Image (cartoon, rainbow, N blue to C red):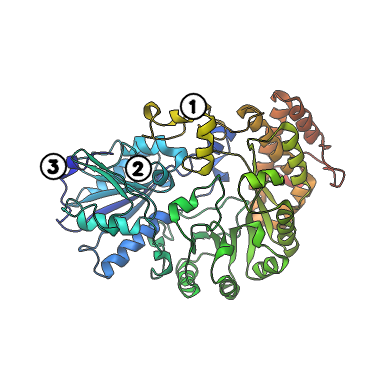
């Protein structure tokens, strides 16, 4: 970390000199392997503000109202989507910060964008601006060299400590300092993550949406991916914190700690703000699992009264036909269901706590209720083979799924999967500078830029390139079939069909490339069959009749 002494001794930064300015910088979220490798156009991407930054802003507003910080901070939200490039973004940040006696830049760091965000922040003058980073990546990999402060876990209380105690003799001491990592006068301080339950108590609105959008600023208006869209003016929202599950590929619980639910009475006030003040007609719950809310029945009743369309994430084991019908009646249109696999061995390896039958029943329950199922699906477990993956793809194709969200098992930094992989893949130690745990980040120069970006795969019988072929085959086999086209047409708003047509065209091009260039013979054969309209699939399935349904031909 940048030693705080360079800021303290510069004579240009005065924490007690008046109202501080905090620039909330949302950067790098859309730099993913999908854009780098798959070549998806940006119009397929989502555009949302950072709820983490907006919650921090709201926490600071409440802290000042309650007398917990001496000065009312000036806050401004900067989103990379509003600027032509990082240089323009940086100039805007620096120009806005300049008049304040104490200037802070707060940025969330995402694993797939570490290098870009590090390059951006490294252009700031560390003697003039206090650089603070947080989020998922710094929580699990806090040793970095491009910030003064790293906040691990929840940031509200640590940020309050920073604004009231920075350069004081008590800085870094006490329970409020938990989560703050820094270096001062050559001494490194690394703290455990900070957890809190403020989501359950912070006054409405829980997020400072006003900072991120206006009725006239269309660049900063939220935008959904077409497969998650439920309305024309969406907004994102979270009413639970953390996840009760402990899947091996996920690190959510390491960042947020124990489950916290926001009371429905406060959610009602949040919705008044989102719907009535800002005019949003749809909501996307970003909770890891909305069904874990402590007052779920009351929440469903509230959503039904508000008559707003919404989507959410959920786990299969808690989905029943009755629950699915209740959700549909409350306005639910789409559910991301993290089933991951239809192979029990893989589910057990991922510590999902589910069975294949639970997954099937959950998908059928949602589809029968009229809710579109976005299916989270993973291949590439250590025990996977060519035959086992092909068999699992066939099982997936039998089910009434609206959208397939496929991926290859990733040993994400900090997760159980990462710790497992370090025991069998010594090269993972090269993710940090000089083989250390300093500046941990994906290394595409070592492990390739294909998914998982800059990281190795863990499957022992198939290479990363072969897994990518199978991943693409699964998606092309799913999308280029008549049953998918029928379901997508039926469950999508008419104004999305032109964009969806481009998606199907893009998948046709993917299948054509696989049929011509795939290394695996079976992938070439199956891709060619998909394009001919007669893909291999179990006898129980209705055969596809067209590689690109007429409804999704451009110009149709």
Is residue 379 something that shows in the picture? yes
Tell which circle, 3 or 1, labels the residue nearer the N-terminal end: 3
In this figure, which residue is indicated by the disc labeled 2? 89
Tell which circle, 3 or 2, labels the residue nearer the N-terminal end: 3
Give the image quarter of residue 430.
Answer: top left
> In the image, residue 469 lies at what x, y percent?
67, 31
Using the image, determine if residue 68 lies above or below residue 78: below
Using the image, determine if residue 375 lies above or below residue 438: below
535 vs 419, left or right, is right
Tell which circle, 2 or 1, labels the residue nearer the N-terminal end: 2
Q: Residue furthest front?
A: 423
Q: Residue furthest right?
A: 539
Residue drawn at the location 16% of the way across and 45% of the way down: 8
> In the image, residue 552 lies at what x, y percent?
72, 45
Looking at this view, is 540 or 29 the one in front? 540
Q: Which mark is residue 427?
A: 1
Label 1's element?
Answer: helix
269 vs 464, left or right, is left
Screen quadrant of the N terminus: top left
Looking at this view, is 344 or 515 the one in front? 344
Label 3's element?
Answer: loop
Q: Nearer the viewer, mark 3 or mark 1?
A: 1
> In the image, residue 134 lies at what x, y percent?
37, 48
422 vs 538, left or right, is left
Is residue 453 something that shows in the picture? no
Give the CA separation, mark 2 to mark 1: 36 Å
Q: Nearer the viewer, mark 2 or mark 1?
A: 1
Give the CA separation, mark 3 to mark 2: 27 Å
In this figure, which residue is indicated by the disc labeled 3? 9
Circles 3 and 2, Cβ within 8 Å, touching? The answer is no
């Amino acid at each position: 970390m940048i030693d705080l002494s360079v800021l303290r001794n510069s004579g240009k930064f005065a924490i007690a000199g008046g109202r501080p300015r905090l620039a909330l910088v949302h950067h790098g979220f859309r730099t993913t392997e999908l854009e780098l490798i798959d070549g998806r156009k940006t119009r397929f991407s989502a555009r949302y503000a950072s709820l983490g930054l907006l919650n921090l802003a709201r926490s600071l507003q409440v802290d000042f109202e309650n007398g917990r910080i001496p000065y009312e901070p000036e806050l401004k939200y900067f989103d990379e989507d509003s600027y032509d490039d990082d240089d323009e973004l940086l100039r805007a940040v620096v120009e806005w910060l300049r008049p304040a006696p104490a200037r802070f830049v707060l940025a969330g760091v995402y694993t797939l964008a570490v290098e870009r965000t590090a390059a951006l922040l490294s252009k700031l003058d560390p003697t003039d601006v206090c650089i603070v980073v947080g989020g998922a990546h710094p929580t699990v990999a806090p040793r970095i060299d491009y910030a003064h402060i790293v906040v691990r876990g929840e940031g509200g209380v640590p940020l309050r400590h920073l604004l009231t105690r920075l350069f004081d003799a008590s800085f870094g001491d006490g329970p409020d300092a938990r989560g703050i990592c820094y270096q001062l006068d050559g001494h490194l301080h690394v703290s455990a993550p900070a957890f809190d339950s403020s989501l359950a108590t912070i006054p409405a609105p829980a997020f400072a949406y006003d900072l991120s959008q206006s009725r006239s600023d269309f660049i900063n208006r939220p935008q959904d991916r077409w497969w998650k869209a439920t309305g024309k003016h969406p907004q994102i929202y979270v009413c639970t914190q953390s996840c009760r599950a402990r899947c091996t590929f996920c690190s959510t619980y390491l960042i947020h700690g124990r489950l916290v639910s926001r009371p429905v009475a406060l959610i009602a006030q949040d919705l008044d703000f989102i719907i009535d003040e800002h005019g949003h007609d749809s909501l996307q719950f970003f909770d890891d699992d909305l069904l874990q809310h402590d007052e779920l029945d009351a929440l469903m009743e509230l959503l039904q009264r508000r008559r707003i369309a919404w989507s959410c994430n959920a786990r299969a084991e808690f989905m029943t036909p009755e629950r699915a019908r209740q959700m549909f009646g409350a306005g639910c249109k789409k559910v991301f269901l993290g089933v991951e696999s239809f192979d029990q061995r893989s589910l057990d390896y991922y510590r999902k706590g589910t069975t294949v039958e639970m997954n099937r029943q959950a998908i059928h329950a949602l589809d029968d209720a009229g809710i579109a199922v976005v299916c989270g699906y993973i291949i590439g477990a250590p025990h996977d083979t060519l035959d086992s993956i092909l068999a699992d793809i066939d099982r997936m194709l039998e089910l009434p799924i609206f959208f397939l969200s496929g991926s290859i098992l990733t040993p994400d930094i900090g997760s159980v999967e990462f710790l497992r992989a370090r025991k069998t893949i010594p090269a993972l130690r090269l993710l940090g500078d000089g083989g250390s745990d300093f500046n941990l980040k994906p290394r595409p120069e070592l492990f390739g830029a294909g998914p998982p970006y800059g990281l190795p795969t863990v499957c022992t019988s198939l290479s990363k390139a072969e897994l990518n072929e199978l991943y693409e085959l699964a998606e092309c086999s799913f999308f280029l079939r008549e049953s998918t086209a029928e379901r997508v047409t039926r469950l999508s708003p008419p104004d999305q069909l032109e964009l969806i047509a481009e998606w199907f065209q893009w998948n046709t091009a993917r299948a054509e490339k696989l049929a011509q260039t795939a290394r695996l013979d079976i992938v070439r054969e199956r891709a060619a069959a998909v394009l001919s309209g007669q893909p291999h699939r179990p006898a129980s399935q209705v055969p596809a009749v067209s590689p690109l349904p007429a409804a999704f031909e451009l110009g149709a």
